[in-house]
Image (cartoon, rainbow, N blue to C red):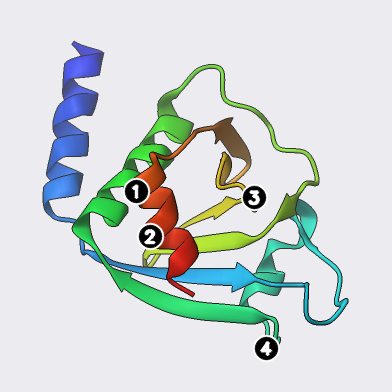
Amino acid sequence: MNRIFLLLVTMIVLSCTSKEVLIYKHDNTKNDDGEIFGSNLKSFFNKNPNIYTVSINSKEISKKLLLIKEEIETVNNNVNPDDSYYEYAFIINKKDTLYTDYRLEFWRYGNNGISYTLDDVTKKIIISSH
């Protein structure tokens, strides 16, 4: 019963989802300005010439990111992230931000995280967007 309710809520959220996703990418290859660690994720939103921002209008990407967020919130075996390096921040709506590593394989929402591998097409769209 709980699982059915969660599925219904997820379907409603996904049907109402905006298709615009704002992506922040930190590139420290041009200047050695360090890395963005989990203990200082607000650095994504500071003025920095090595942080690129792009907007993607893709309902599929938006749905995939919301599913990852839901998975982090509902999975019992999610991980408390350590102070790892993050390269991407995704704003999927005004109050939800996902962070991920350079491989797009470890995802963080709030104080929880999971390993999640994107399909090659989604990964290629995100990487080529900046």
Q: How many marks?
A: 4
As drawn, the label of residue 121 is 1
Residue contact between numbered discs 2 and 4, judged by CB atoms under 8 Å: no
* In front of the other: 77 or 61: 61
Whole-Å distance between the Cαs marked 2 and 1?
Answer: 6 Å
As drawn, the label of residue 47 is 4
Other-residue count near label 3 (Cα within 10 Å), few / some / many at <14 / 14–19 / ≥20: some
Q: Quadrant of the N terminus?
A: top left
Q: Earlier in the sequence, mark 4 or mark 3?
A: 4
Residue contact between numbered discs 1 and 4, judged by CB atoms under 8 Å: no
Residue 20, image x, y percentages: 28, 69
Question: In this rendering, which labeled residue sits more in front, label 2 or label 4?
Answer: 2
- To which residue does mark 3 refer? 101
Whole-Å distance between the Cαs marked 2 and 4?
Answer: 25 Å
Q: Amino acid at mark 1?
A: Val
Q: Amino acid at mark 2?
A: Ile
Q: Amino acid at mark 4?
A: Lys
Residue 91, image x, y percentages: 43, 64
Other-residue count near label 1 (Cα within 10 Å), few / some / many at <14 / 14–19 / ≥20: few
